[in-house]
Amino acid sequence: KDTGQWLCHYHADIKQAYLRRLKVEERLNMALNEQSLSMAYQCQVNEQGKIHAMEALIRWQDGELGMVSPAEFIAIAEQSDLIFKIGDFVLARSIGEFAKMHQHSDTPLELAINISVMQFQSSVFIPTLLHSLETHNVTAQSIILEITESLFMDNLEHVIDTIKSLKSRGIRFSMDDFGTGYSSLSYLREYPFDVLKIDRSFIAGITDNKADCNLVKAAIAMSHSLEIKVVAEGVETKEQLDLLNELNCDIAQGFYLSKPLPAAKLLNFSLRYLKAL
Ligand code: C2E
Ligand code: MG
Ligand code: MG
């Protein structure tokens, strides 16, 4: 009987997850047509306290489902060709808005864009990206593509060719969520990463947990010896920021510095931020 009950719950859970997936997929299709997706930008701040770059993060406020997290809907979109439409939207919108923000900034800014595995592997990815840059008159040198190590799991030759081709044009690469998954050091040795982003699960523990602190310290030392810059994700307190500075971390990003904001608000914020320094 216990097993039967357990199976019942199990089936109910699976059914619920399945229905949710279908719903998200259906509403996401509509969102793309209705253009109810938007982008938010989160500042990355360097050791001098200056905004050095921002990360573009997609936002979806749905009429029926409310705010849906990209962690949920990107994974669902990746199971169909929806991910290509979303990827195109992200490139066009974030590069367009970045061009405007850049015009209003008195210091050079960089834009970090998250690229999903399927989007990266698509044959139209490079031309679409270059087209967006050209349309908005943005240089390749201001773009950093955030990819995760899951990219190296299959279709490796094509992935490497794409990285090389983009690198030769001046586009840089960042390894996102470092420390989760396998985090094989060989990726860092074999592929020309410019930036390593330490996952926020490590940053959360650095001020209380010696092991987390030592791991972050080691990741920074290793990256620097490979001439890779380090971004700490998810910095939520002043203590974390101070410790990261002490550990020679190059760049910090997190709620303590700024939440992700729409382009118009960020413009205001960054001007205020710079004046406050
Ligand atoms: P990610 O690329 O690692 O992005 C960082 C996530 O951490 C963002 O969540 C951001 O809002 C959140 N975050 C930043 N600072 C803090 C902090 O101090 N504390 C905490 N608790 N969280 C913080 P978000 O926007 O929900 O995005 C989740 C993930 O969804 C992203 O992780 C990325 O993998 C994916 N994603 C977001 N936007 C896009 C996009 O435009 N394209 C693709 N392909 N994926 C995206
Ligand atoms: Mg990212
Ligand atoms: Mg990350």
Image: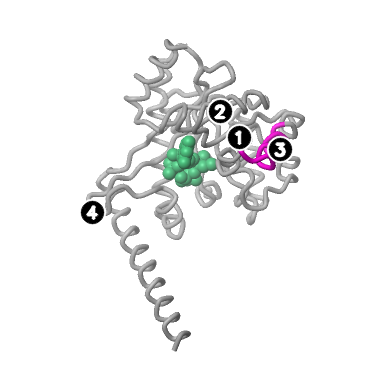
Q: Tell me which corner region of the image, top left, top right, bottom left or bottom right, holds residue 65.
A: bottom left
Q: Which residue is mark 3?
A: 214
> How far apart are the two marked residues, 4 and 1, measured between alpha carbons?
40 Å
The residue type indicated by label 3 comes to Asn
**SS for callout 1:** loop
Q: Which residue is mark 4?
A: 64
**SS for callout 3:** helix
**SS for callout 4:** loop
> How far apart are the two marked residues, 3 and 1, measured between alpha carbons?
11 Å
Q: Earlier in the sequence, mark 3 or mark 2?
A: 3
The residue type indicated by label 1 comes to Thr
Q: Which residues are magenta?
A: 207-220
Residue drawn 32% across the image and 53% down it: 28
Q: Residues within 10 Å of mark 1 (few under 14, many from 20)?
A: some
Q: Which residue is mark 2?
A: 239
Q: Tell me which corner region of the image, top left, top right, bottom left or bottom right, holds residue 214.
A: top right
